[in-house]
Image (cartoon, rainbow, N blue to C red):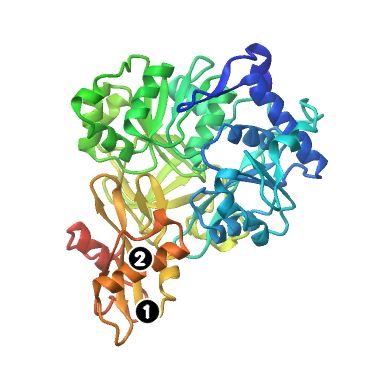
Amino acid sequence: MYPGHWAKVFPDKPAVVHATTGAIISYRELNDRSNQLAQLMWAKGLRPGDHVAIFMENHLRYFEAAWAALRSGLYFTTINRYLTSEEAGYILDNCEARVLITSAHLAEVAKDLPDHAPRCTTNLMVDGTIDGFGAYENAIAGYPAKPLADEPAGQFMLYSSGTTGRPKGIVRPLPGHKISDDAGPVGALQRALWGFDEHATYLSPAPLYHSAPLGFTTATQALGGTVVMMQRFDPVDALRAIETHRVTHSQWVPTMFSRMLKLPESVRTQFDLSSHRVAIHAAAPCPKAVKQEMFDWWGPIIYEYYGGTELNGLTHVGPEDWLKYPGTVGKPVLGVIHICDEEGNELANGKDGLVYFELPQLSFAYFKDDAKTKGAQHPKHPNWSALGDVGYVNDEGYLFLTDRATFMIISGGVNIYPQEIEDALIVHSKIADVAVVGVPNEEMGEEVRAVVQPAPGVEPSPALEAELLEYAREHIAHYKCPKRIDFEAELPRLPTGKLYKRLIKDRYWGKHDTKIV
């Protein structure tokens, strides 16, 4: 199922509602406009397997672009709206997009994107235009609102930065069937695990460029439900949206829970949340105390899953099982879990090791990076793959995550990769060496901290810290920038030259065991 089906069943039903403005796109409008964009891209020569990208804030038009690609057999890449033009331009060029859709709201960054991606020859902008971009609304108006003669299912190709180098595209094979055949794998999970159907009203408080919000919103529409899209997360606005739109399902990251829990009791209790049946969370570890407080407030409606954009495996835990095994991320519902040591040997229950998922065959690859793909595979079993997380399985088969082997930072549910920041800072003339780690932050879970070894003759000072922070903000997206910089006379490196980052990180987390994972 997809919007083409639901446009016939209930054409005037809202497919998506803007939580702030109340503006809607009906299923008829979503179907017609995504058909028009699909026709435009076909006329431009795009065929199944080609690529289209979007660089946009949370906007109602986002869904038209997504469904146009999904009903045309195209790969659809979302670009983080907070990236700099250089960062966004790299992804746009690397994914080989031939069409870019952006907005006037992001014009200051978007104006430079064509220079970074000369292969992208069709650049469209909603809500206005600048040089180098055509008006999206006018462009699609010239094409009929009818389906293509053939509508093979497309696929998302999203980017996930590695611990080294540039971001990498995660590519999975095209489904190989028509878009009308089913609701896709996410829709199947929504229906089986959480009871999504055409009666669901799903609140999405997160940025649509992320994998889970994009996948869950489009799957909700594939099932005929209504998406309530927030422009950005605000704890009071989120609670108001549940009441106003009679939200039945929602998805969160733990930071959002923390912010809602910090609201005054009088504010938290003024909203009618009685329609709310299922609250799902993922993306980052949730502190046990925070989750327990949410249970105390919302009742036993909180579900959790663990998995990556790679879709190489998935675990799930419902309220009853989490309360029985606090801290677990559940049992596998996709793939078989194996916990292995550094040599790939399987470990006994209760022993920490790298978490692998086994599928009949590897389900993904990193776009144009065979070495990274191979690095995610088990040394002896190529159909086992890992995301870099460390954990253990108890005797009952529940997975518990204990660490991240890659030192990836998760701040407010957003993945931040230290190497990218280190690469930007190390070229500064006053820096001899640098390490970036995640340090504890009560609200965000982790925050970015840079530890700098000044260049010879350079003395640490508040002025130097301010200079380096400003330099970082000029070269990388602000949300990735260190919140503070600490100084060390010398960073710990092994004789091989490898940075012994565990020693640095453990100082901030109060750990004294320096075992390298």
State the image quarter where residue 316 is shown: top left
Residue found at x 66% / y 35%: 70
- Label at residue 497: 1
Front in this rendered view, residue 310 or 257:
257
Q: Amino acid at mark 2?
A: Leu
State the image quarter where residue 366 is shown: bottom right
Instruction: Name the image quarter holding the C terminus.
Output: bottom left
Q: Which residue is mark 2?
A: 469
State the image quarter where residue 394 is shown: top left
Please tell me whether mark 2 sits on a helix, a strand or a loop: helix
Instruction: Name the image quarter holding the N terminus.
Output: top right
Q: Earlier in the sequence, mark 2 or mark 1?
A: 2
Q: Is residue 120 visible?
A: yes
Mark 1 nearby-residue class (10 Å; few <14, some 14–19, many ≥20): few
In the figure, 180 relative to 54: above or below? Answer: above
Task: Left or right? Give the position of 458 relative to 74.
Answer: left
Residue found at x 50% / y 54%: 83
Task: Left or right? Give the position of 409 relative to 387.
Answer: left
Front in this rendered view, residue 36 or 357:
36
In the figure, 450 relative to 130: above or below? Answer: below
In x, y percent, where is residue 47? 78, 43
